[in-house]
Each structure stands twice: as C-alpha cells, then as structure tokens.
Amino acid sequence: QKEVEQNSGPLSVPEGAIASLNCTYSDRVSQSFFWYRQYSGKSPELIMSIYSNGDKEDGRFTAQLNKASQYVSLLIRDSQPSDSATYLCAVTGNQFYFGTGTSLTVIP
Amino acid sequence: GAVVSQHPSWVICKSGTSVKIECRSLDFQATTMFWYRQFPKQSLMLMATSNEGSKATYEQGVEKDKFLINHASLTLSTLTVTSAHPEDSSFYICSARDLTSGGEQFFGPGTRLTVL
C-alpha cells in the first residue's frame, strides 16, 4: 500500500463549479498535510497546509482533514480555467510523502 | 514566503559531459534539501535527500556515482550529472524543507536538461 494515494484523474469540472480533490494516507502518526499545484512544465507550488482536524479556508480553496479516517481533501470553489493543473497531496510524519497527483481540467 | 532558486533554468549539453545544478534557499536555512526528476506527463520521482554536512541518501535505483550531490551549507545544495547521456534528459527539481515553520517543502523552479 502506498503511503499517500490520490485518484490520478483526469477530473473535469465546468467553470464556476466546485472541484473536489481527495487524498488518503496510511501512516497514522502523520502530522502535517499539504496541497501543491503543479502546472504543466513547471515545478510544484504550495497552496495549502493543514495540521489539525477540520476545515481551513484560504480564498477559493478549502482544505479538509479527518485524521480518524486518514483522509485530506481540497475543495476549489468557483473553479476557473486557470485552476487546470495537477494537484499533489503531501503528508509528513517521520518522512515526507507525496501522492502521484490528480489532474484537474476546468472547462470554460 | 520561502523562496528557493535553481540555476541554471535550462541547459543543453553534449553526451559525455557533466552538468552541475545549484539549488539555494534564499530566505531560510534548509537542513534538508531534496532532488527530484520528472519526465513528461509523469509524477515527481524523488532521487535523493540531502542533509547539510552529511552524505546524501539516494532512492533505490538512483546511481550515486552518476548523480553527485553536495550539501555544503544550509542554503546551498548541488546536483552534478556526470557523463550525461540522452536518457538523462529530464526536468530536475530541487526542494528545501523549512523546519522552522510547518515543515513544508518549497520547490525551486526546476532545471530542464537536454543531452544531445
């Protein structure tokens, strides 16, 4: 079992809709959780971090963490074509693990 | 915010030559830096973890004699691709971990290497 699992997609949503990206992890001692966005041909960019159970909102982005169920999600409200990218989930505990990423396409 | 720079941003070289890529954390000290490689339309592949003042830890399948990593200071790590061949052509990305904040990794902009 991989340490971090994401649905590779592709996920397509219409412009203005909510995009929901999910991630599960296997290490129960994981402490910190991050979402990165990677545009094609570019390096990953940190967009959200979350450390405790519940929701964390930053503009159109909301990260949700449920440690009991070992999942973390990212919601993108009012999706824009510029949100089209690959989204990487990352989890740290004793080590730092990345998921393989979910490709998101926002259709104008 | 934390900034990581990489140099050069792209390089073209002849087969058999060596290429050095620099990774710098500009506004924080990074005791740990990471080197990744990414082929087109594929996931990030961790090559090695570099700790300041000690030898790098290489992932399985990565040749340590071909990909030389030096982390001589808290702000600089270098990756040297020795005797590069066309199959080494890839997008090389470094990252640095800021343990004084949330422990997240911040990525450099990447170096695109083309070996002719």
Image (tube, helix red, strand yellow):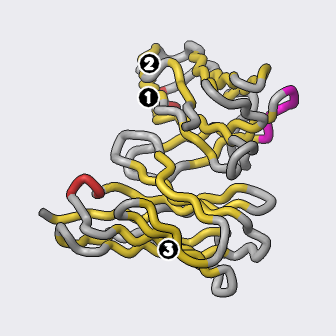
Q: Which mark is residue B112?
A: 1
- For marks 1 and 2, the one nearer the N-term is 2
Element on which disc 3 rests: strand
Quarter occupied by the N terminus of chain B = top right
Element on which disc 2 rests: strand
Q: Nearer the viewer, residue A59 or B82?
A: A59
Q: Which of B20 and A55 is in front in this view?
A: A55
The answer to whether residue A78 of the structure is visible from this angle is: yes
Q: Is the magenta stretch mostly helix, strand or loop?
A: loop
Q: Name the residue under label 3.
A: A73
Badge 3 and badge 2 both on one subunit: no
Give the residue drawn at x 45%, y 41%: A43
Please tell me whether mark 3 or mark 2 is closer to you in this view. Answer: 3
The answer to whether residue B87 of the structure is visible from this angle is: no
Q: Disc 1 vs disc 2: Cβ atoms closer than 8 Å? A: yes
Q: In this view, does A108 lie above or below B79?
A: below
Q: Which residue lies furthest to the left in this view?
A: A108
